[in-house]
Amino acid sequence: MTQALPRAWFGRDPLEVAPELLGCTLAVRGVGLRITEVEAYRGESDPGSHGFRGRTPRTAVMFGPPGHLYVYFTYGMHWCANLVCASDGVCGAVLVRAGEVVDGLEVALERRPGVRDRDLARGPARLTRALGITGEDDGADVCGGDDAPFAVLPPTAPVDPARVRSGPRVGVSGAGGDGVLYPWRYWLDGEPSVSPYRAAKPRVRRG
């Protein structure tokens, strides 16, 4: 039986963890998702992170310990799931943006009926729906052992480094309008499940 990735594996810089998550399987209550796209967030040093302004009740999970889910609500309608990284007390996480359902396909299709297989988890909101992840799962342990409802399993076959691509995160710009686009989105080239890139929309200041 494949062993889930241990907590120490997640206790590193999100920029190290993120590309290594590609090809891993996120297993959630009987549904397995091979991860094909992620985004790294570095907390208080990253203006795109929810933890940029420090710990709050909402972001407390992001400050560790690593190896847990950080789940948040966005646009008033969607859940997004992150894997908490970095050492305990340091804010860091990796957003799981997209993947291919490789186990429990029937269950995922029941949650998203009439959807093509490649689109079941093609984007972070679709992904959580396919896996059945909601806000009640915020803080869930992904290192709880073989019988736990959540686990991250290593790739079944080595991932070719030549297939790993990186670029700006979707809809995220730099700090203070400096225009910096952090290339902290990673994906597997040629995977149909990878979501389309959308640049951040500039904010219009009123008054």
Image (cartoon, rainbow, N blue to C red):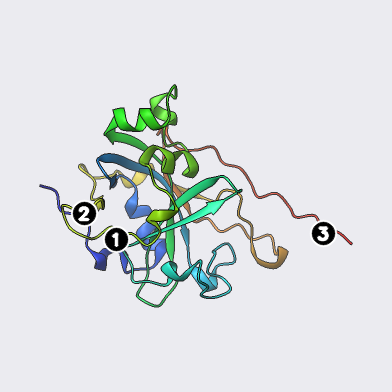
- Residue 202 vs residue 16, the one in the foreground: 202
- Relative to 3, is 101 above or below? above
Per the image, label 3 sits on a secondary structure element best described as: loop
State the CA–CA distance, disc 2 to disc 1.
8 Å
Quick check: 70 above or below 115?
below
Q: Residue furthest bottom?
A: 89
- Going 45% across and 71% down the picture, which residue do you hit? 60
Image quadrant where residue 139 sits:
bottom left
Q: Residue at x 35, y 60 (%)?
A: 17
Residue 148 marker:
2
Mark 2 in CB contact with mark 1 (< 8 angstroms): yes
What kind of element bears circle 1? loop
Residue hosting label 1: 141
Which residue appears farthest toward the right when viewing the image? 207
Q: Position of residue 165 (x, y in %)?
A: 44, 46
Instruction: Identify the residue under disc 3.
Output: 205
Looking at the picture, does residue 52 appear above or below residue 25?
Answer: below
At label 3, counting other C-alpha atoms closer than 10 Å, the crowd grade (few under 14, some 14-19, many 20 or more) is: few
